[in-house]
Image: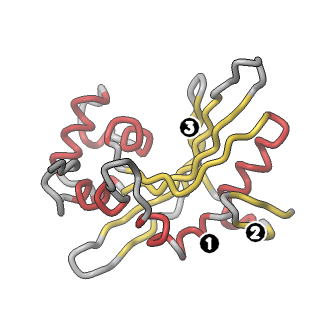
Amino acid sequence: MDYSFNGITGQVNTCYLKAEWIGFDSEEFMFTKKTYEHKEEGLSFKYLYAVSVTNVGDSNGEDLNLVTLELVVDKSSLAPKVLESILDSSGCDSIDEIDNWNIIAEGGSSIIMGEELVGEDDLEKTIIGAMATVRSIDSMRGFFIDKPMNNFGMTGWDIIKYSIGNKEELFEIK
């Protein structure tokens, strides 16, 4: 089967589609079972990928879905103050209860690597495409993480450095 996501195309290799689903009313998450590792002097951390599907609807009544591929800093690499912040806002009773969904929803320790808005007819193919691009996107992750994430010029590296404790404040507005 051919796939396309975020400008990357190819043939689906099902061994890269191993994932776990977590579902909610208007949003579902799929997390890779594989944990990756970034090793660089002064910047080492573990991470995984998530595909989220959010039903965003449309003013015309069309059923639209936002499919997003995110790099998520693994819980084992998160700084204690980030874990405490997630714990405070998630409703979890202990750090052991924090899962990958909490890290994205409560901790902000993820970076969007690509996203596409699709109708219901293209949803399954787009989800498969997002998961199938993980290997390619991971090999170019620096390119995606280098991109500015907001009007302050913050990049994915700023989010990662804050998440793992290498940066004191997430926003450094001068």
Circle 1 sits in a helix, a strand or a loop, which is it?
helix
- The reply to whether dot 2 and dot 1 touch (C-beta < 8 Å) is no
Q: Position of residue 152 (x, y in %)?
A: 31, 50
Residue 55, placed above or below residue 149: above
Residue 23, placed above or below residue 133: above
Q: Quadrant of the N terminus?
A: bottom right
Q: Is residue 99 left or right of residue 94?
A: right
Q: Position of residue 160 (x, y in %)?
A: 31, 59
Q: Give the mark nearest the N terminus, 2 or 1.
A: 2
Nearer to me, 118 or 151: 151
Which residue occupies 22% across, 30% down? 88
- The reply to whether dot 1 and dot 3 touch (C-beta < 8 Å) is no
Which residue occupies 28% across, 59% down? 158
**Residue hosting label 2:** 13
Nearer to me, 31 or 161: 161
Q: CA distance from mark 2 to mark 1?
A: 12 Å
Q: Position of residue 63 (x, y in %)?
A: 75, 26
Q: Within 10 angstroms of label 2, few (less than 14), some, or many (20 or more) residues?
A: few
Residue 117, placed above or below residue 165: above
Residue lying farthest bottom? 41
Circle number at residue 136? 1
Residue 90, placed above or below residue 159: above
Q: CA distance from mark 1 to mark 3?
A: 24 Å
